[in-house]
Amino acid sequence: MTQFTKQYSRPIEIHNSIQACEKEDLKLSKAHKTYRAMLEDSTISGSTSFIKSLLNRKFTLKPHLRSTKAEKELVEALNKSLEDLKPYNFNRTMSNILSLVEYGTSIQEVTFHRKNGKQVFKTFSPISLQSVKEYVYDKGVLVRLELNPPMNDGLIRNVTKSPTSVDGSKVLMFSFMADSDNPLGRSLLRGCYSSWKELTAYRELQLIAASKNLGGVLKVEVPSEYLASYYNDPTSDHAVMVDQLIHQAKMMGQGLTSFVALPSDTTEGNAKLFDVQPIKGVDGNGFEIEASIARCQRSILMALQSSVLSLGQDGESSGSYGLSSTKSVLLNTFLSAIQDTIAAEFMKAVRLAFELNGLTDNHLPSVVWEDMTEPTWEEFTSGIKEIGMSGLVEPTGEMDQWIKQSIGAPIAGGTSGKAAGMMREAREASNANDE
């Protein structure tokens, strides 16, 4: 007996739908899952990994200039404890903190333990945004976090029972670009949602077009009374025959969308009663999907502040390699802002450490990061040359030793006074030529 079913194909709608999807997908309750889906895109995943790899640098605490002996000893102990974090080491802790790049906020619980008579950092435990049930504030100060039971598929079993709340004084909330409208921070991925959604639609359409182009579309012609019986009387012989014909068409093609069933009736002049002709989506003067995909990818790179990755890959729009220095400076400025955000929130843990050790916060240390980039040999020598020619610095023996120490060269020998005289002569000759 033939089963009568109707299936409808819903083609992708690009117009007037991306804005509607954005409002729904970026709600606070759904944003986390949306960002995880966006990270499956190769352009977004590569850009965020690139940014996080640049930001994943060590930092140390530098004592205040007026620090007492006890404060300096505590800072030294805190720096030592950062190297001995367990079970999450420093690199893993930074990786957890840098999840603010994707989700806008990273929540860590800081714990202390006593070592050599001082309360120092023990670990920074990450708290998933999805596990937070409620953020409890009092006049802008986080009082506590109410947590949901952790979601687990049974693969991992924790022996220790998970807490239901966390004291706000032990919580570090690293939020990027937090404001009154986005108190939990703003994810970098939010700015490229529209481009990602549009790019996803283009790729799906491109796959559909490739499937139709490679597999083709079958045209099945049957008398109109057979089609009428197929829809109105599924148990009739005509309907069974059409059903078998459709089944064979699906086997020869690629499912229900790989064929079209048309009545074979003709008029007295032998003209088809029904005529279906494909409309080409792309022609010589029409829409180019590859150009649109490339445009979306450039927009994503720009939104993620990682357009430097496209240098040299596209001569038409990405710019020359000579622009890499300027773009690198802009990227470093952007990354420094994220480092400042992390350092400002980390000082909350430092204040707590000073309080636990009976010290005031009058002389708190500062956070010093490792350099993200180092100048090339050409940039270094060019800079030293410009400084020397300007007359601001004379090549004395102390300067010679400092330069050699900076580049890791042997410091034996030093620069004599003759080098200073040679530099002055070169500068005077340069000025004479300019005149």
Image (spheres, rainbow, N blue to C red):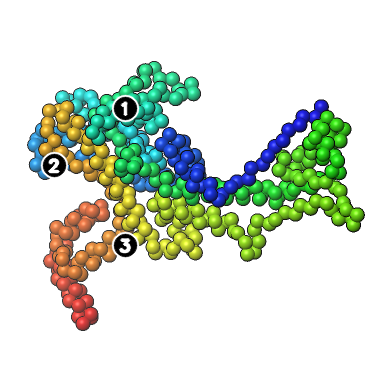
Q: Is residue 301 left or right of residue 144?
A: right
Residue 360 or residue 425, whichever sits in front: 360
Residue 83 or residue 124, whichever sits in front: 124
| C-alpha distance separating marks 1 and 2 | 33 Å
- The correct choice, above or below, for 400 with respect to 425 in the image is above
Percent position (x, y) of residue 238? 86, 35
Q: Which comes sooner in the sequence, label 1 or label 3?
A: 1
Q: Which mark is residue 212?
A: none
Amino acid residing under circle 1: Leu
Instruction: Indicate which label's residue lies in the foreground, 1 or 2.
Output: 1
Q: Which mark is residue 64?
A: 2
Residue, disc 3:
378
| C-alpha distance separating marks 2 and 3 | 35 Å
Question: Mark 1 falls on what kind of element?
Answer: strand
Question: Mark 3 falls on what kind of element?
Answer: helix
Image point 47% across, 40% down: which residue? Answer: 24
Residue 266 or residue 177, whichever sits in front: 266
Instruction: Indicate which label's residue lies in the foreground, 2 or 3.
Output: 2
**Residue 57 seen:** no
- The correct choice, above or below, for 102 with respect to 88 in the image is below
Location of the N terminus by quadrant is top right
Location of the C terminus by quadrant is bottom left
| C-alpha distance separating marks 1 and 3 | 52 Å
Residue, disc 1:
145
Percent position (x, y) of residue 99? 38, 38
Q: Which comes sooner in the sequence, label 2 or label 3?
A: 2
Question: Mark 2 falls on what kind of element?
Answer: loop
